Each structure stands twice: as C-alpha cells, then as structure tokens.
Image: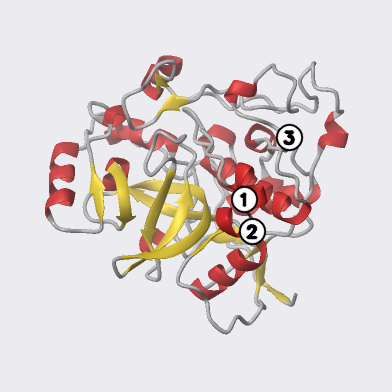
C-alpha cells in the first residue's frame, strides 16, 4: 500500500471539545413537536418522533451524548497518513454490508453497544471498528474490545488531545491502538463477570425511547448528569485470568480515507470504518429511514462506525451503527444519505490495519 503523509491540522488544541454546552444551552429548549411535524410532513426519506429523553430537557442535555471534533473546527487533528491505493474493482455493487460479507464475524460486527451518559462516542466508534477488523483478519468472533480502556487511557498529545467523557477524536484513538493497544472489554452487563479485562462500567440506558424494564432512562442515571471519565488503570478485573499486558491488542497501522468510492473499496477490502458527522436537532428525533438534515440547528460532532451502503427507492445511503444501544433507530443502526457528504460524514473517515 502506498500512502502519503499530510500535516495534522491542529492550529489550536485547547480544552474545549465539540458539543460543549454554552450558557444559553442550559436554558434553551428544542421544539421537538414542531421538528417532528415538519419532518413527517415534507415527504423526506426518513421518519421522526419526539425523543423521550429530550422531550422536556435543555439543549445542554442533548449535547451530552456527543463528543468529537469535526474537520471544520480548530481542535480537529487530521490523520497523519491517508491511504491512496485500493483494489481497482471493476464495479462497486449497489449494496454491501460488513455483517453479511463476513458472516462468521456477525457476532462482533453486528453487536450494538451503549456509551451511557458519557461523551465517549469517539472511543466507541474507533474501538468497535478496530474490533470488527480484528475479527475479519483473525476469525476471532468472541473477543470484544474495551471502549472503557480507550476512553479512560487514550488522552493528551498521544491521543489527539482526547478528554474521556468530555470528547475525543477517532484519529487519535486509532493511532493509540498502534502504539499502546487496547484490552478486551464487554458491556455493562459483563462488569465483574471475569469474562473480559475491562468491561464498560457506565450503566446502559434508554437514550431516546421510553425505557422498558429493567433498562432505565438515561436521564435517571447519575442525577441526569454526564458521568465522569472512568479512571485509567493498567490492571484487569480481579477475576479475569489473563494479565493486562498480555490482553492488549494492537493495530499495525492507522490512516484516513478520502472519497466515496475509496470508502466503499476500503469497506469491501478490510471492513468497518470509523466516521463522524454533525448532529442536528432533527437527528435526535430519528426513528428510521435514510436520514438527511431537514431542520434544526447543529449540536455537535458524533462518532460512529460505518458498516456498509445501499439504495432505498432511488436514495443512496450509508449504513452506520450508533452507540445508543439497540432500542434506538433501526435496531441500533441508522442510514444516512450517501454521496453528498451529508452532515460531513464523508469528510472525517479513519481506519487502520488490525
């Protein structure tokens, strides 16, 4: 693979990360009734409903689940390397799905996780993509990687100035996977089971829908406030029988990808991508279909993983997996307009070799 280097864009790396609420956000409310009425009446490609979580909360609360930097923002750090050569496919298929192309890895690639009340989307979108690619390369369809290890330990200059639950950057996480690695780690339900080294310790919750017991509403966790970043540790759970150092998994490279066709070729060759996009108020009301921004103001950047593409009644789309558990969207996934850099989703793409 030939690659070229580009200068990382980091003009002013400060402590204010994406989606950080300002003073007005704590007293401003979104009129979701009006947004939903508009989206569902204009004949667009997706449907909306008032999100249970944000029906009576401020814009500040909406920004809690977001936490990544987009390329137009000063703090953005671009990948130092971009991949430029791919297999020259004669025809890119109309549709593709990582889960179907490597069915043996579906337990990993199709697994939907939950970031809870923490701006750790950047850690999930990167750790999960690496996890998917590791399975595709090795055939290991049982080992889950630890977003908690990433969110708590990937920080500072070595991680594009990522700041845990206060936000971070997938490009920094992928670089961190190459020189520090990430240990195994299951979901909140796996905490203290001894199944993985560092499972996620922040409780799963219903993000936008009414909670079905035993799940609780995210607004009922931690007094409705965002969790503090878990402490970085270099030890596994007491009842896990592999040492922390031996449990580390390393990526062999990290790089960016530019262009729709290159994204498709990369997905076909190696699997899942880490991507980010700007969340607008109307996305919080998404229930299904091919999302494209219709109304409402920008809230902040959000990182997820991309697993494929397709066409729905003539509308091209990407398939992405969110980290708001499988009660959200289309069983935890969503589709978004492809080919027009919708909400910036084609402009912030990173991955690497497992």
Within 10 angstroms of label 3, few (less than 14), some, or many (20 or more) residues? Answer: many
Residue tagged 1: 129
Please say whether residue 40 is visible from this viewpoint.
yes
Nearest the viewer among 30 and 22 is 30
Q: Quadrant of residue 267?
A: bottom right
Classify 297 as above or below 225: below
Nearest the viewer among 227 and 304 is 304
Q: Nearer the viewer, mark 2 or mark 1?
A: 1
Q: The C terminus appears in which quarter of the rendering? A: bottom right
Q: Quadrant of residue 35?
A: top left
Residue tagged 2: 351
First in sequence: mark 2 or mark 1?
1
Residue 47's label in the rendered image is: none
Q: Is residue 264 found left or right of 310 in the rendered image?
A: right
Tell me the SS state at disc 2: strand
Look at the numbered discs 3 and 2 and tell me whether their residues touch, using CB distance below 8 Å. Answer: no
Q: Is residue 158 found left or right of 63 in the rendered image?
A: right
Within 10 angstroms of label 1, few (less than 14), some, or many (20 or more) residues? Answer: many
- Residue 117 horizontal/vertical position (percent): 46, 27
């Amino acid at each position: 693979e030939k690659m070229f280097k580009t200068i990382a864009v980091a003009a002013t790396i400060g402590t204010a990360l994406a989606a950080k609420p300002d003073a007005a956000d704590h007293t401003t409310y979104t009129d979701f009734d009006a947004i939903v009425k508009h989206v569902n009446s204009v004949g667009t490609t997706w449907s909306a409903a008032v999100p249970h979580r944000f029906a009576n909360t401020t814009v500040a609360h909406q920004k809690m689940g977001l936490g990544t930097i987009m390329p137009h923002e000063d703090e953005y750090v671009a990948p130092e390397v971009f991949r430029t050569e791919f297999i020259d496919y004669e025809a890119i298929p109309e549709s593709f799905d990582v889960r179907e192309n490597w069915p043996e890895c579906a337990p990993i690639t199709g697994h939907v996780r939950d970031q809870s009340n923490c701006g750790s989307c950047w850690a999930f979108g990167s750790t999960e993509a690496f996890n998917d690619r590791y399975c595709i390369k090795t055939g290991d369809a049982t080992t889950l990687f630890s977003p908690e290890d990433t969110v708590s330990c990937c920080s500072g200059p070595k991680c594009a100035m990522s700041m845990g639950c206060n936000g971070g950057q997938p490009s920094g996480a992928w670089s961190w996977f190459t020189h520090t690695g990430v240990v195994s780690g299951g979901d909140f339900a796996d905490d203290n089971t001894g199944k993985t080294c560092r499972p996620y310790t922040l409780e799963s919750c219903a993000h936008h829908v009414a909670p079905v017991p035993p799940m609780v509403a995210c607004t009922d966790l931690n007094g409705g406030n965002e969790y503090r970043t878990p402490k970085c540790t270099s030890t596994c759970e007491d009842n896990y029988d592999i040492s922390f150092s031996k449990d580390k998994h390393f990526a062999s490279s990290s790089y960016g990808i530019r262009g729709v066709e290159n994204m498709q070729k990369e997905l076909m060759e190696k699997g899942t991508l880490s991507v980010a996009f700007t969340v607008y108020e109307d996305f919080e009301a998404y229930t299904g279909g091919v999302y494209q921004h219709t109304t409402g103001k920008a809230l902040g950047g959000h990182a997820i993983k991309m697993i494929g593409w397709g066409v729905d009644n003539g509308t091209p789309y990407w398939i992405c997996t969110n980290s708001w558990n499988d009660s959200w969207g289309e069983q935890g996934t969503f589709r978004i307009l492809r080919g027009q850099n919708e909400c910036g989703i084609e402009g912030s793409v990173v991955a690497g070799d497992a």
